[in-house]
Amino acid sequence: ERDFEEIARRGAQRRTQPSGVEQVSLLEHLWCPSRPPFPSAEDDTRASWELSDRALDIDVVSESWTEVEHLRGACRLVSCANLLVQVGYRDPTIWHSVVRSAAGMLADGGVLLLYDTTEWGGYLDRASMQKFCEDEGLALEVALHAVVGPSDAAAAGARATMALEVLRKRPGAPRQSISGDLGDAAAAAYLKSVSRLREEGNQFFKMGPGQGMGKAVRCYRKSLDALAVASSRGCFGPKLREVASRLESNLSAALLDAGRPEEALLAAKRAVHWDPSWPKGYFRQAKAHQALGQVDEVLAATVLMQQFEADPMVVA
């Protein structure tokens, strides 16, 4: 558990140090507010888990980032730090493919944050970066450029010169709305991707508690994220509402088996939201309430489950 008041106090000290130089931790800035109201320990834990569930290992120098393809065109922030510090001596222009791939992941107005050495391949030179983006038609423009270094000793050489560069994606051509009708090829492709991720999650779920359950949670999260992207592009008809309900139910079961009943309850409530007449959503709610020791809520969810099970118009 993090002490937000202490983190804020340390941040204030850094900003008022005698040198007049402000040192900023990007992660602390993104994760921690500098002043009240601070998130509760429960909200902080839940947010941390949800971010951790979405953490993925990708090969940033590959031509395609298949692990995050389901988020293409939907990301608000992509960051890459110390790439050329590690591989610049071997391939000084490897940053070309990284910037191309990152541009494809960004939503309109999204930000690409780069922090690296300026030693290799003209990387993080403002003029060179802007020219590259224009030549490649990436719709990226340099919004901020700052050179830092050498930080310790002049003898450290060029590698000690680091730069921070922020690029923003300009609005592109308007996206075509995709029909929720599954006869539409694009909508069918979305559903196929969602189904594939869901099936991967099911296979991990069958492995039982332990590492497999964590992987199941991640797969269900990815599948739901893919649905969110589909929704943002106009593809969210009745069929995908049903799929969302089933996915949230699966996620609830995996979270409960992973020992995270509060999150399991939230997922179960979302399952009911997407399909209020589906009995299993209420069953998931009852299981989560039971794990939390909430007896009255267990009874209420069970009554609703039995009510919809008895309704001949409900298809499970």
Image: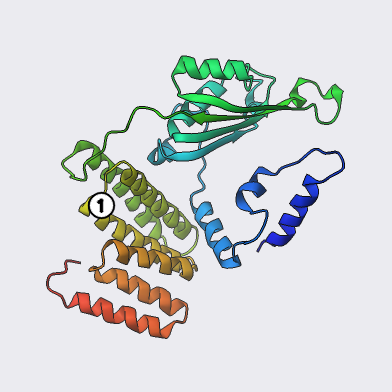
**Does 51 sit above or below residue 157?**
below
259 lies left or right of 12: left
Q: How many marks?
A: 1
Toward the left, the furthest residue is 312
- Answer with left or right where residue 136 lies relative to residue 45: left
> Is 22 displayed left or right of 141 in the figure?
right
Residue 206 appears in the rendering: no
Observer able to see residue 96: yes
The N terminus lies in quadrant: bottom right
**Looking at the picture, how far across and down is residue 282, in whole percent?**
31, 73
Residue at position x 77%, y 26% in the image: 160
Q: Quadrant of residue 39?
A: bottom right
Q: Residue at x 62, y 62 (%)?
A: 37
Tell me residue 115's x, y (percent): 64, 31
Element class at badge 1: helix
Percent coordinates x, y for residue 224 in the rendering: 37, 52
Quadrant occupied by the C terminus: bottom left
Q: Residue at x 64, y 54 (%)?
A: 33
Residue in the foreground of this view, choosing between 85 and 273: 273
Residue type pointed to by label 1: Leu
- Rendering colour mode: rainbow
Taking 250 as reference, is 2 left or right?
right
Classed neighbour count for the residue bearing mark 1: other residues with Cα under 10 Å, few (<14), some (14–19), many (≥20): many
- Give x and y (percent) for residue 243: 27, 55
* Relative to 167, residue 48 above or below: below
The residue indicated by pointer 1 is: 240
Q: Is residue 221 above or below residue 173?
A: below
